[in-house]
Image: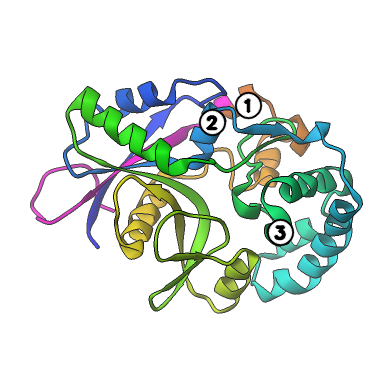
Amino acid sequence: MKVRVLSLKSAYWRPGAPYQRLILDMIKNHVKDGDFVVISEKAIATALGNLVDESKLKAGMLAYILARVWIRFAWGYLLGVTARMSLKNIQRLRCYPLREGARHKQLCLMTVGFFHSLKHWSEGGIDVSNLPGSMATIPLAESDMVAKTLRDEVQRALGKRVVVMIVDSDKTFTFRNIHLASRPTSVEGILNVGPLAFILGRALKLRARSTPIAVSEKVSAELALNVAASANRARGSGSGRTVWDASARFNVPVTQLTWEMLESVEHRPVTLVRLRSDPAESGYGDG
């Protein structure tokens, strides 16, 4: 699929940021009818205040078992190897922090359930990367409504008919026409099979693409995945793909990252993706 892609820079969106107005300002000089406006779920969730301070949670026995036994040993010595994870990430799993990790698993158990809590990280869409302190974002409860509302706002304010897509960099794995995601998505044709998607997809070296969470129009799963993948390649990973990467970048413990540190890094929460029917058509960069 030939596309043209333009990722747009923005200041970091703190809780309460007027994300709809910010998106309109970012795209108004570039967007055309038919474009996909692809937005990071993490950025929207943060702006909407979909945040939990894990330091305020009290971990139960099951959460401690998941942190101490399941993550350190099952993932650190078996599942991580099976899933062909890097040695660096396997070491991180084997040294998984017990107190903070148990609190994180408690949040997972409370919000996405036991099955999704079995994943090593990014459990069911919960994310702690690119966030300060002990904060975590939880998945958008009504992502379809958010996408459709933004689509309508673009048409009202800019007079453009676009397709709005909300995406997560967490991967969906494809075998022929079967698409396996490790978190919930409303896109028809993508199956949520929890941590099995990551384990099987990595072990079998299946095609991996970012996960479309919601789309304002009905599109095929294959098209949605291709658009999400193109946007993810252009967007980058902010302060790092994992909380450990951000910690290393700023040389502080993972729980001592601050809003100011995150604001010092380039962020690209919005990407325009244009399907290219005519190779000679002018537009932004090729994807």
Disc 1 element: helix
How many other residues sit within 10 Å of disc 2, few (<14), some (14-19) or many (≥20)? Answer: some
Residue ID at (65%, 72%) = 83
Q: Are marks 2 and 3 in contact (CB under 8 Å)?
A: no
Closest to the camera, between mark 2 and mark 3, is: 3
Q: Amino acid at mark 3?
A: His
Q: Is 77 placed above or below 238 here?
A: below
Check disc 3: other Cα within 10 Å, few if <14, some if 14-19, many if 20+. Answer: many
In the rendered image, residue 130, in percent from the top left (x then y), is placed at 60, 37
Disc 1 to disc 3, C-alpha distance = 26 Å
- Alpha carbon separation for disc pair 2 and 3: 26 Å
Residue drawn 83% across the image and 61% down it: 72
The residue labelled by disc 1 is 261
Mark 1 or mark 3, earlier in chain: 3
Of badges 1 and 3, nearer the viewer stands 3
Figure quadrant of residue 135: top right
Q: Residue at 53% across / 31% down in the picture? A: 265
Image height check: is 39 above or below 132? below
Q: Amino acid at mark 2?
A: Val
Distance (Cα) linking label 2 and label 1: 7 Å
Question: How far across and down, in percent of the image, does residue 167 sit?
Answer: 45, 48
Residue 194, position as x, y percentages in the image: 61, 63
Residue plotted at (76% across, 30% down): 256
**Marks 2 & 1, CB-CB < 8 Å contact:** yes
Q: Specify whether 255 is left or right of 10.
A: right
The residue carrying mark 3 is 120
Residues drawn in magenta:
263-287
| Residue type pointed to by label 1 | Met
Say whether residue 65 is magenta. Answer: no
Is 223 in front, or is 253? Answer: 223
Q: Secondary structure at mark 2?
A: loop
Percent x, y of residue 204? 55, 79
